[in-house]
Amino acid sequence: MKFQPSIIILYLFLFPYLIPANANPGPKCSALPGYRERIEEYVDSLAVFDTHEHLFNPEELKNTYFLDFTLLLHQNMYDDLVSSGMPNSVYNQLFNQPLKATEKWKIIEPYWNKSFNTASCRVILLSIKELYGIDSLNGSTVDSLSYRIKQAYSGDWFNHVIKDLCKIDNVIQETDFIGVNRPYVSYTDKFSDWITATRKYRIDSLSVAQMEPINNLEDYVRSMSIAFEEAIKMGMVAVKINVAYSRSLNFEKVSHEIAEKVFTQIKNGNESHSVSFKDAKPLQDYMLRRLLDMAGRYKLPVTFHTGLQAGKGNMIENSNPALLSNLFFDYPNLKFILYHGSYPFGGILSSLAKIFSNVYLDMNWLYAISPSYAKQYLNECLETVPVSKIMAFGGDQRCVENTYGQLMIAKKIISEVLSDKVHEGYITEYEAKTIARLILHDNGIQVYKIKNTPPVTRQ
Ligand SMILES: [Zn+2]
């Protein structure tokens, strides 16, 4: 049989399409064998910048009823217990009475058995295993775990876990200026009293607390600026805005006149007078923008709670980061740091971080919400967002044990994602290590302009 030239031409034309898809491996992994282990070791050796915490003051813990196994349940796990059906009446008992550990466990156990699957629970189990040598949480281990916790806190456990075990060299703690006074701790502060006002009583309380009259809108703005400057003196390195717990993140531009009208409506009533959110919104929007002005004057970044809210019964649509877009346009020189990978609005957040040069992405808390989501999300972000804008770790925890547990999960995920990307030939081993150092540490220092000067101690 004779080959026709036309058949040969046709074959050459179709050749690329006749090869099975998996026969073309794309860019080859050129890393030397052992890169996974080397990346894991490198990630483990890094100093960590912890972007967000609510850690209990270890000294104050000693005066509470929960320096026992329930310490680790605070915030995330309690949310899951309540979500699985624990009523408020049951929940409140745990804080108001000096119960024994085994008595507390009896109350908790039915709801623990309904929610033991969550990532919050896994963080706790990992923490108690690695830090206290306890393999599971049940009626026969809560006593010995509680004993070990008390023993640990009689020494400098807080420093030991944060500095020695986690290798964290910077923590940004929310608000509690009096609390955790350590040279490596910086603070964010909230100004919710001014930006969520609906009640006359609240405005009057501010006036009493500051011993300054608040009779008109100018006074109200001045009152916020007094609080702001006080926070600056205390070492505030960023402003925190968590209003997505109570209202939408949409903040419109409002004129002074309209805001003043709302202020007068609220102020001119009896002490219990309040207005609806709908009526108060123009004043709240106005005040939020004045707060951003202040942050701009001091060149402080502004952090926003976005996505999933802790606790129960919140409106998830209020926390969609896309609602903030007008602020990104209106404040081009402000750094906006959006928390929690905006779960479940992660794709929206990475799009915003890509579109706007002033939007930064912070994955704090995400590994305790869903490690598999965090893994997929980090993978996507590394393909989407400039690496200088990604901060990959913050605990968002109440106790150092859970910060430790979550960090161990985060480091494993970060190592795996980077190693997979080296394997695919997407990045080199050297680039993987550079990324790890930036997202776990250097970006935090850069974005928050940390100078390692300890904050002032409140007298
Ligand atoms: Zn938080």
Image: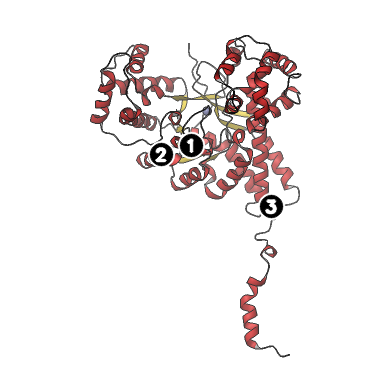
Quadrant in the rendering for residue 394: top right
Q: Separation of disc 1 and disc 2 at Cα?
A: 10 Å
Report if the beta carbon of the residue with label 3 is closer than 8 angstroms to ligand 1.
no
Which residue is disc 3 drawn over? Answer: 423
Which residue is disc 1 drawn over? Answer: 338
Q: Using the image, determine if residue 31 lies above or below residue 228.
A: below
Q: Using the image, determine if residue 25 lies above or below residue 256.
A: below
Residue 282: x %, y % from top left: 31, 31
In the image, 340 versus 231, the foreground residue is: 340
* Amino acid on which the number 3 mark rests in the picture: His
Q: Which mark is residue 324?
A: 2
Q: Secondary structure beneath disc 1?
A: strand
How many tags in the picture?
A: 3
N-terminal label among 3 and 1:
1
Nearest to the eye among marks 3 and 1: give it.
1
Q: Is the C-beta separation of discs 1 and 2 under 8 Å?
A: yes
